[in-house]
Amino acid sequence: MFFDPLYLLVMVPGMLLSLWASMRVKSTFHRYSQVASRSGLTGADAARELLRRQGIEGVKVEPVEGFLSDHYDPGARTLRLSPDVYHGRSLASLGVAAHEAGHAIQHAHDYKPLAFRSLVVRPAMLGSNLGMIVLGLGLALQVSGMVWLGIVLFSAFVVFTLVTLPVEFNASSRAVAALIDGQIISQSEAVDTKKVLDAAALTYVAAAISAVMQLLYFLWRAGILGGNRQEE
């Protein structure tokens, strides 16, 4: 399986798309990190203000090391922002901080896709690695039970990447709307802020496409989509 030219043909487009999306988000963030917001608020200030306006209490906002390592931890009810975002006063910083605050708002409002994503995150991480190993061994040993187990495990990862899309898009839409409603950014600033969030969303789209393509390949190799798993 690992030397199958078809596997490389399936994987290369996804890898290139992921690489392009990563470069795009970094370049877009860098560009708009040079554009100061009129409000003068830092990303941390904006996140706290958005949470306050939503009446959400008990969510901590703290810095975390790394470049664009920003995330919301629903278990700890903590919004962690990278240094450039936490301390930054640019449109890029406000956009990313508001996006993460959007996840905290989703959590507080019991947004179902976020709850489902949190439920499948551990099986998904297990399936992304173990699933491929089990499936590969099953194909090599021609053990159908192992093949099916590998496919089920890897499918959990695919489901995770797909459900991540509406979660991320919804958080971004909430972020831009909240920033405008809170008069933290103007309508004209919202255009550039949205560009940063749209670029970030491409990384999730690339991950989902790559995962789906892999699953289709595995289904073909297992003979489920017309392939022949006896062919090695």
Image (cartoon, helix red, strand yellow):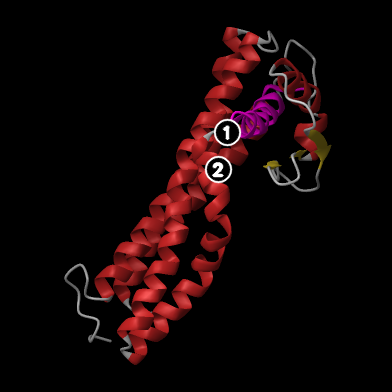
Q: Which residue is mark 2?
A: 115
Rendering coords of residue 87 (x, y %): 83, 30
- The residue depicted at 72 percent of the width and 19 percent of the height is 55
Q: Is residue 207 visible?
A: no
Say left or right for 7 vs 157.
left
Marks 1 and 2: CB-CB under 8 Å? yes
- In this rendering, the answer to whether 28 lies above or below 231 is above
Residues in magenta? 89-109
On residue 159, which mark appears? none
Rendering coords of residue 143 (x, y %): 33, 88
- Give SS at disc 1: loop
Amino acid type, residue under disc 1 in the picture? Asp
Q: Look at the image and tell me in which quarter the N terminus lies.
A: bottom left
Among the 4 quarters of the image, the one containing residue 227: bottom left
- Real-space CA distance between mark 1 and mark 2, rounded to the nearest whole angstrom: 7 Å
Q: Which residue is mark 1?
A: 110
- Give SS at disc 2: helix
Amino acid type, residue under disc 2 in the picture? Ala
- Per the picture, the main secondary structure of the magenta-coloured stretch is helix
